[in-house]
Amino acid sequence: MVESAGSSVTRFKPGDAVYAACGNGFGAYAEFKCLPENGAVALMPANMTFEEAAAVPVGAYTALQFLRKGSIQSGSRVLVYGASGSVGTYAVQLAKHFGAEVTGVCSTSNVELVRTLGADRVIDYTKESFMDDGSAYDIIFDTVGKSPFEACIKRLAPRGFYLRAVHLSPLPIVRGLWTNLTSGKKVIGGTMKENAEDLMCLKELIEAGRLHSVIDRRYPLEQAAEAHRYVEQGHKVGNVVLTIRQG
Ligand SMILES: NC(=O)c1ccc[n+]([C@@H]2O[C@H](COP(=O)([O-])OP(=O)(O)OC[C@H]3O[C@@H](n4cnc5c(N)ncnc54)[C@H](OP(=O)(O)O)[C@@H]3O)[C@@H](O)[C@H]2O)c1
């Protein structure tokens, strides 16, 4: 909620409900944050709670920007590896929005969730491997950094994209560069770029009912350390949010 705005600010006024991404200045949580008017801040989707909206920027941003880098279009065959995490749950929904044919990879307890997010097919990685059935994909989007590199490249269609949201260690970076140079296939990593335009685009999709946040757990700000301990186990479903007492 905008508490106060500078005298030259025209996009926002006190009382506006906004959502924002605050950059990668990790190290603390805060109840108040000063942001530039032209930063990654936009009016919040009208049909979301603060908690649901707070989850959107990083996960949905990342999913949106990677899928765009993969030239997603209607009819693309997309495999989302790690479909039950934050990036993954948004990626499944966004890929469906773009008209893709979506396969999600997750564990048994999340199969139903990933199906309800819109996946056409769900592969339970505890029972089968996506490599077994010989399907080809235009995009393989690994949101959790656990997919096997060579096997993914093999499963790509001739001009397919292997998207990796998790920072590449040196060996996959070299393999990725080699793949990009020697084949029509592309390996893409990197970091999302924060911007208000994507937040406005996501707001439209959310208000149109095309995208929602999956919230696993909520912790009060005072229990941020507990929240981290849970997240760091690597099995959260969708998002974990910190709540702030109002008033
Ligand atoms: N590049 C960027 O700009 C950028 C931006 C944001 C985030 N990230 C990175 O993206 C990663 C994903 O973050 P996140 O918050 O979306 O998710 P996350 O919390 O790291 O992932 C949790 C999910 O991964 C699933 N999972 C664990 N092992 C798996 C496996 N072997 N195969 C398939 N799924 C598996 C878990 O479900 P089960 O336990 O049931 O399998 C759980 O639902 C993080 O490493 C984050 O740092 C990168």
Image: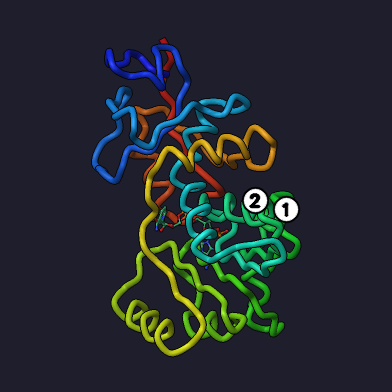
Which residue lies at the image location 60% right of the left edge and 35% below the top edge?
Answer: 204
The answer to whether residue 145 is above or below residue 109 is: below
Name the secondary structure under disc 1. loop
Q: Position of residue 182 (x, y in %)?
A: 43, 90
Residues at badges 1 and 2 in contact (C-beta under 8 Å)? yes
Taking the image as shown, residue 20 lies to the left or right of residue 147, namely: left
Where does the image place residue 117, in percent across and percent down from the top left?
69, 50
Q: In the figure, is residue 16 to the left or right of 140?
A: left
Q: Ligand 1 closer than 8 Å to the CB at disc 2?
A: no
Of pointers 1 and 2, the one earlier in the residue sequence: 2
Snapshot colouring: rainbow
Q: Residue 218: where, in percent of width, then height?
A: 49, 33
Instruction: Report the side of 200 relative to 171 (left or right).
Output: right
Q: Is residue 238 above or below residue 39?
A: below
Q: Which residue is at a point 48% across and 43% down the rendered structure image?
A: 198
Instruction: Confirm if mark 1 falls within 8 A of ligand 1.
Output: no
Q: Residue at x 51, y 47 (%)?
A: 60
Residue 64: numbered disc: none
Q: Which residue is mark 2?
A: 93
The mark found on residue 118 in the picture is 1
